[in-house]
Amino acid sequence: MTDIFNEVDEEVRREQLKKLWERYGTLVIAACVLVVVAVGGWRGYEWWQTKKAAEAGAAFEQAASLAEAGRHQEAEAAFGKLASGGTAGYRVLARLREAAEFASTDRSAAVKAYDQIASDGGGGQAIRDLANLRAGYLLVDGSSYADMLARLEPLTAPDRAFRYSARELLALSAWKTGDMSAARKWTDMIITDPQTPPAARSRAQVLSELITASGKG
């Protein structure tokens, strides 16, 4: 008797499954196809991204080789091409290197390129700070301390990656322009900060001694 009930139950289940398949089978197949297509598309995208990154890496190395060989105009063109058409990471690196290449022939163009990077909201804070700092190195000999302060003071905050270099550059700018009080302020900040790298502290101590010897700071 139990076997009969089991057979009846099995027949009912088969009938229910048949009805479910007739109603939803097409949707199940479509869902499976979508999953396969999605997985295949993602794998294809990953492959494409890897390929593009490899191509950008090779192009960056080639441009760097041109720069090292002193072929600056060709290097500028190569970095410029990569800056506009490379992958995201290499675009940033290429823009920085392109600006560095400009510095060897046209300082104003280099500063302009660095300023464009620094004002680009798409770059990270560290990249923007680095661009501002590099522009500062190009400007320190001819700019007023006030201009250098406006550019670099935000970089001196305790949470900024290039704070030590920015402080050192401001100390140098103040000293060059004869503002010994400001120069003393920055050298003291560098020397008393326990996290200042040893080389930067040593340079600040030398500058501090020069300020003292001048009798104005």
Image (cartoon, rainbow, N blue to C red):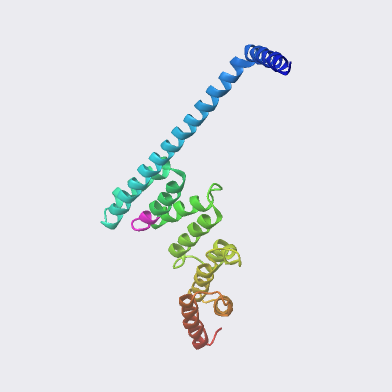
Horizontal and vertical percent for residue 128?
52, 55
User: Between 133 and 68, which is closer to the camera in this rendering?
Assistant: 68
Task: Tell me: residue 87, above or below residue 151.
Answer: above
Going by the image, does 92 lie left or right of 216? left
Residue 38 visible in the current orientation: yes
In the rendering, at what x and y percent does residue 152 appear?
55, 64
Query: Residue 15 location, x and y as percent?
Result: 67, 12
Give the magenta part as a residue range.
100-106
Q: Find out whether residue 43 is within the magenta segment.
A: no
How many circles with numbers are drawn on the protein?
0
Residue drawn 52% across and 53% down?
118
Give the residue at the far front of this rendering.
1
Q: Residue at x 53, y 87 (%)?
A: 215
Q: Is residue 105 magenta?
A: yes
Quadrant of the drawing holding the C terminus: bottom right
Q: What residue do we see at 29% from left, 57% from top?
A: 68
Front one among 144 and 7: 7
Is residue 181 in view from this perspective? no
In the rendered image, the quadrant that contains the N terminus is top right
The image shows residue 1, relative to residue 149, as above or below, that is above
Q: Is residue 9 above or below residue 60?
A: above
* Spot occupied by residue 205 in the image (x, y as percentages of width and height): 50, 82
